[in-house]
Image: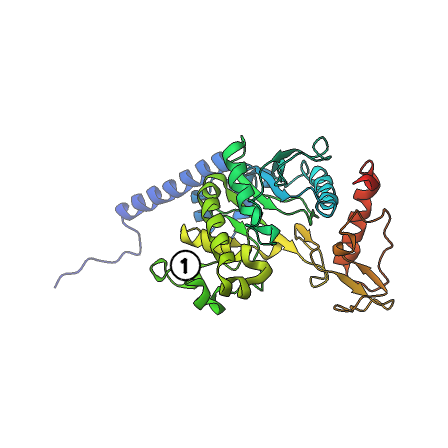
């Protein structure tokens, strides 16, 4: 067989192909540099791919992180009782302080007053008056008025924002709160004591098997929740009806107790196929949560009792204490004493924030 003689030199065709390949790579690299700037941050084995497919890799950091703001309307239900009023005043004070800070997406604010008549805070806090449930319907469980209040507010109010934050009087904004919802999914705080999987027998009365497993029910209450207005408009009437049915059911009333209305919201959401993004950073609850960190809301529902060594004495009145239930008939005094040394940051911050609010709210003692 006659073979081709190897001269050690590349053929003309090979050289032409090599030149074309070199030209093609160089051309694309130059074009990329012109369009996207220096490739300095793209050094590495995948730098060319990153440069080609990510046209904003060289954009300024502040531009890359920008997103369209999704403002939400802050709404809380309340009564005209002094106990509710002083908490609302503190809550509204911190809303105003946080509203326009960076990272906040707060919009408007409404106190939904379900006492059926105006009170003395109408000029201080934006308020809509709605009707309470008929006499006797709540059976002494005043929280049962909450879903009914939201149903009325959603029907009557003009709400500019697309999203709503359902909040409570004993919430204090400790950091600016962005819209935590994710691609339309509402955001909620998971409560350790809401356990659908451990209460299936009772829940099946209100969440039939055709709707799926009880694990479809989120371990949440209605607050704090950030949710699209149109979703809440669908859920709220069901939430109200489920709450009333649960209260009328002796077994459900006994099992769920003071968190019955929370279970009702979770069930109502699941009946509509709505699931929530669970955000543990949504809220902290002193004295159990010790640090503020990057959490957004302080919920001061639990009493904080400590001895003078800074040791928690929960269940026993401490030498130092702060408990909202100590002020059922009127507001706490201004300038509450700070807790002893070694008490957790969360409790110290709570007292400092209460003190700042009461020092700056006019006519504090007249609530």
Regarding residue 120, the answer to whether it shows in the image is yes
Please state which of residues 104 and 225 is positioned toward the viewer in this rendering: 225
Q: Is residue 220 above or below residue 66?
A: below
Q: Position of residue 319 (x, y in %)?
A: 86, 65
Q: Position of residue 92 (x, y in %)?
A: 70, 40
- Quarter of the image for the N terminus: give it: bottom left
Circle 1 residues within 10 Å: few <14, some 14–19, many ≥20: many
Q: Can you tell which quarter of the image residue 201 is in?
A: bottom left
The residue at 66%/53% (across/down) is 295
Decide if residue 14 is on the left or right side of residue 156. Answer: left
For the image, the number of numbered tags is 1
Please state which of residues 8 and 199 is positioned toward the viewer in this rendering: 199
Q: Can you tell which quarter of the image residue 62 is in?
A: top right
Name the residue beneath numbered marker 1. 207
Please state which of residues 65 and 28 is positioned toward the viewer in this rendering: 65
Decide if residue 79 is on the left or right side of residue 164. Answer: right
Regarding residue 184, the answer to whether it shows in the image is no
Q: Position of residue 142 (x, y in %)?
A: 61, 51
Q: Secondary structure at mark 1?
A: loop
Decide if residue 364 is on the left or right side of residue 243. Answer: right
The residue at 71%/37% (across/down) is 96
- Quarter of the image for the C terminus: give it: top right
Q: Position of residue 324 (x, y in %)?
A: 75, 54
Please state which of residues 113 and 235 is positioned toward the viewer in this rendering: 113
The residue at 81%/43% (across/down) is 358
């Amino acid at each position: 067989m006659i073979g081709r003689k190897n001269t050690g030199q590349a053929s003309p065709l090979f050289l032409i192909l090599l030149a074309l390949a070199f030209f093609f790579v160089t051309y694309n690299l130059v074009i990329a540099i012109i369009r996207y700037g220096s490739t300095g941050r793209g050094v590495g084995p995948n730098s060319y791919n990153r440069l080609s497919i990510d046209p904003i890799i060289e954009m300024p950091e502040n531009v890359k992180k920008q997103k369209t703001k999704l403002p939400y309307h802050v709404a809380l239900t309340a009564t005209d009782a002094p106990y509710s009023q002083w908490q609302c005043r503190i809550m509204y004070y911190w809303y105003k302080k946080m509203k326009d800070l960076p990272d906040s997406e707060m919009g408007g604010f409404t106190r939904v007053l379900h006492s059926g008549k105006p009170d003395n805070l109408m000029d201080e806090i934006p308020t809509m008056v709605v009707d309470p449930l008929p006499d006797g319907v709540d059976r002494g469980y005043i929280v049962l008025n909450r879903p009914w209040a939201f149903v009325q507010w959603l029907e009557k109010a003009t709400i500019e924002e697309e999203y709503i934050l359902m909040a409570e009087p004993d919430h204090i904004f400790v950091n600016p709160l962005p819209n935590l919802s994710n691609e339309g999914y509402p955001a909620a705080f998971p409560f350790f004591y809401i356990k659908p999987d451990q209460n299936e027998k009772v829940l099946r009365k209100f969440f039939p098997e055709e709707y799926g497993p009880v694990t479809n029910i989120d371990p949440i209450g209605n607050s704090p929740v950030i949710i699209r207005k149109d979703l809440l408009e669908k859920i709220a009437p069901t939430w109200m009806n489920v709450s009333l049915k649960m209260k009328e059911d002796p077994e459900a009333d006994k099992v769920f107790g003071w968190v019955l209305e929370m279970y009702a919201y979770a069930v109502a959401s699941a009946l509509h196929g709505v699931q929530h993004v669970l955000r543990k950073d949504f809220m902290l609850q002193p004295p159990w949560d010790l640090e503020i960190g990057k959490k957004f809301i302080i919920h001061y529902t639990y009493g904080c009792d400590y001895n003078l060594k800074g040791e928690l004495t929960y269940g026993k009145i401490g030498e130092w204490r702060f408990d909202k239930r100590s002020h059922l008939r009127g507001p706490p005094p201004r300038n509450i004493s700070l807790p002893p040394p070694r008490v957790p940051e969360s409790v110290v911050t709570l007292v400092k924030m209460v003190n700042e609010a009461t020092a700056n709210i006019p006519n504090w003692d007249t609530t």
